[in-house]
Image: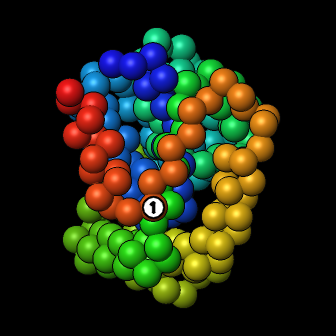
Amino acid sequence: MKDCFQRVVVIGTSGAGKTTFAGRWSEMTGCQRIELDELFWGPNWQMTPDELFFERVEKAIAAPCWVVAGNYTRLRPLLWNRATSIIWLDFPFPLVFWRVLKRTMTRCWTKEPILNGNRESFTNAFFKRDSILLWCVQTFSKNRRHYSQLVAGDDYPHLQFFRLSRRKQAENMLVEMTR
């Protein structure tokens, strides 16, 4: 595996496929998969205090080879200073929103546990201010602008950035990992 792929952070808006992509990357490379939401959300959707959250992340990224799925801004200096590459899943809004809607509806219907036993509900998904659907709509454009600035900037000159705007590009990158 190329050195630039030893420690990878996968970013993108909710529904872009960060967790799925990171999981496949982990399977293909043998690198540890780290899902930030899993380290952050406790039972009953309780947020982990920052001190404990940072401690968990620091412990996880102590490994020599990892792939992180997540966008927590407050973790950026910690993760990006240690990372070798950033993979930005920058797919079109209709695709991303469809994925979030489909995933949320499925999870609400099946009551499948996610993130430390939590479950999504129709009430939370459609009638609450912190709805993942509303979050997706509200943050999509803002995230795209913000990530564009980060990629164009020079705050992290040691990183290799990969902006994948089509599913085929993401698939090709995963296939390349097996060669």
Q: How is the image coloured?
A: rainbow
Q: Position of residue 159 (x, y in %)?
A: 62, 29
Q: Is residue 23 above or below residue 7?
A: below
Question: Measuring 55% from the left and 25% from the top, which residue is drawn there?
Answer: 84
Residue 169 or 120: which is nearer the viewer? 169
Question: Measuring 43% from the left and 32% from the top, which residue is drawn there?
Answer: 67
Q: Position of residue 102 (x, y in %)?
A: 31, 77
Determine whether, in the image, residue 119 is placed left or right of residue 75: left
Residue 111 or 167: which is nearer the viewer? 167
Q: Residues within 10 Å of mark 1 (few under 14, many from 20)?
A: some
Question: Measuring 45% from the left and 16% from the top, which residue is drawn there?
Answer: 3
Q: Quadrant of residue 128?
A: bottom right
User: Seen from this angle, which residue lies furthest bottom?
Assistant: 127
Q: Position of residue 98 (x, y in %)?
A: 37, 79
Determine whether, in the image, residue 5 is placed left or right of residue 83: left
Determine whether, in the image, residue 20 is placed left or right of residue 46: left
Q: Which residue is mark 1?
A: 165
Q: Position of residue 109 (x, y in %)?
A: 26, 77
Q: Is residue 89 above or below residue 39?
A: below
